[in-house]
Amino acid sequence: QVRLVESGGGWVQAGDSLNVSCEASGRSISTYTMSWFRQAPGKERDFVAGIRWNGGLAHYADPVKGRFTISRDDAKNTVLLQMNSLKPEDTATYYCAAYAYGNHVPYAGNYGYWGQGTQVTVTP
């Protein structure tokens, strides 16, 4: 069992930066691909960014490329999403997810563990 707890969400203005963190417990995340997904009201849950368990290759959804950076610290069992140049369309609940030995990074159905989410609101 992997328990994931997100933190760091909040209200910011367009153009601001914000970091959201994911702290894992119960098991080391070293063999898990770790990703962030987001869901806005009335919309589906979308992939945002992921970082592989083997080698740390990062993947990003097109809307966030060049603005968001995902990183992981396996020793601390944490994952960080740094978000820069935030836009109102980034407003959503952000979820951390874990996928054991994951290769198909963007597909939510592959992830066995999810956090409860943290709200990010970007005002114009």
Image (tube, rainbow, N blue to C red):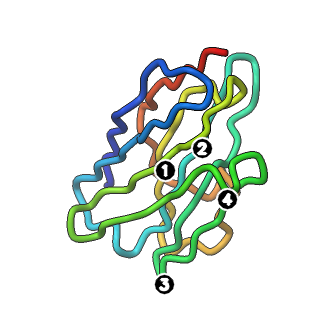
First reached walking from the N terminus: tag 3 or tag 1? 3
The three-letter code of the residue at mark 1 reads Ala
Residue identifier under label 4 = 60
Residue at left offset 49%, top offset 50%: 97
First reached walking from the N terminus: tag 2 or tag 3? 2
Q: Are marks 2 and 1 in contact (CB under 8 Å)?
A: yes
| Spatial CA span between label 2 and label 4 | 10 Å
The three-letter code of the residue at mark 3 reads Gly
Residue identifier under label 1 = 97
Residue identifier under label 2 = 37
Residue 55 has which mark?
3
User: How many residues crowd mark 4 within 10 Å: few (<14), some (14–19), many (20+)?
Assistant: many
The three-letter code of the residue at mark 4 reads Tyr
Camera-side residue of 13 and 52: 13
Residue at left offset 63%, top offset 50%: 67
Q: Secondary structure at mark 3?
A: loop
User: How many residues crowd mark 3 within 10 Å: few (<14), some (14–19), many (20+)?
Assistant: few
